[in-house]
Image (cartoon, rainbow, N blue to C red):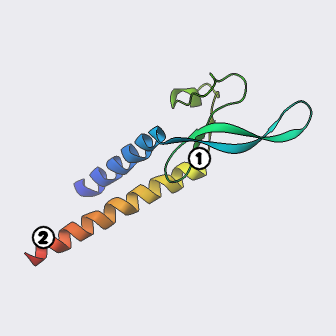
Amino acid sequence: MKKTLYINILSFLLTSLSLFYQRYIPVNRIVVDRVEEVDRLAGGFPFVFLIDGDFTSPGNNISVLFIFWDLDEFLLHYFILDYLFWLSFLLICYLYLKKRKNRV
């Protein structure tokens, strides 16, 4: 039970730390009465789950705190996919180390 809890907490922390991997992605936004692709700063690895907001957010800045004030765009389904990616990565590492330990 404790190992499961530790792995879940660690995968949540890795998902949160993946916000430090930031890159620009093209996003469709309304620019002067028409929709155009605009490059916005986004964070998350391997899936982008936090995108810089349009007008109220400070330019080229993403933060987890801005989610609560609706300044940045938070994509919940990509956050869950990112969490599942890190969870499966940690479980694979754990099973590999457990198997290797039993061999010796």
Spot occupied by residue 43 in the image (x, y as percentages of width and height): 54, 41
Tag 2 residue: 101
Badge number at residue 76 = 1
> Which residue is most to the bottom?
103
The correct choice, above or below, for 62 with respect to 101 in the image is above
Q: Nearer the viewer, residue 32 or 63?
A: 32
Mark 1 to mark 2: distance in Å? 37 Å
Pick the residue in front: 14 or 43: 43
Residue 55 image offset from top left, x and y in percent: 73, 24
Is 58 positioned to the left or the right of 16 in the image?
right
Q: Is residue 93 above or below residue 57?
A: below
Give neighbour class at mark 2: few <14, some 14-19, many 20+ (Cα, 10 Å). Answer: few
Image quarter of the C terminus? bottom left
| Residue 56, image quadrant | top right
Element assignment for label 2? helix
* Quarter placement of the N terminus: bottom left
Task: Give x and y (percent) for residue 77.
Answer: 59, 52
Are the residues flagged by discs 1 and 2 in contact, CB closer than 8 Å?
A: no
Chain-order first, disc 1 or disc 2? 1
**Helix, strand or loop at mark 1:** helix
Residue located 43% across and 46% down the image? 15
Q: Amino acid at mark 2?
A: Lys
Measuring 84% from the left and 32% from the top, which residue is drawn there? 31
Image position of 19 (left or right of 95): right
Identified by mark 1, the residue type is: Leu
Residue depicted at 25% across the width and 64% down the height? 94
User: Can you say whether 61 is above or below 49 in the image?
Assistant: above
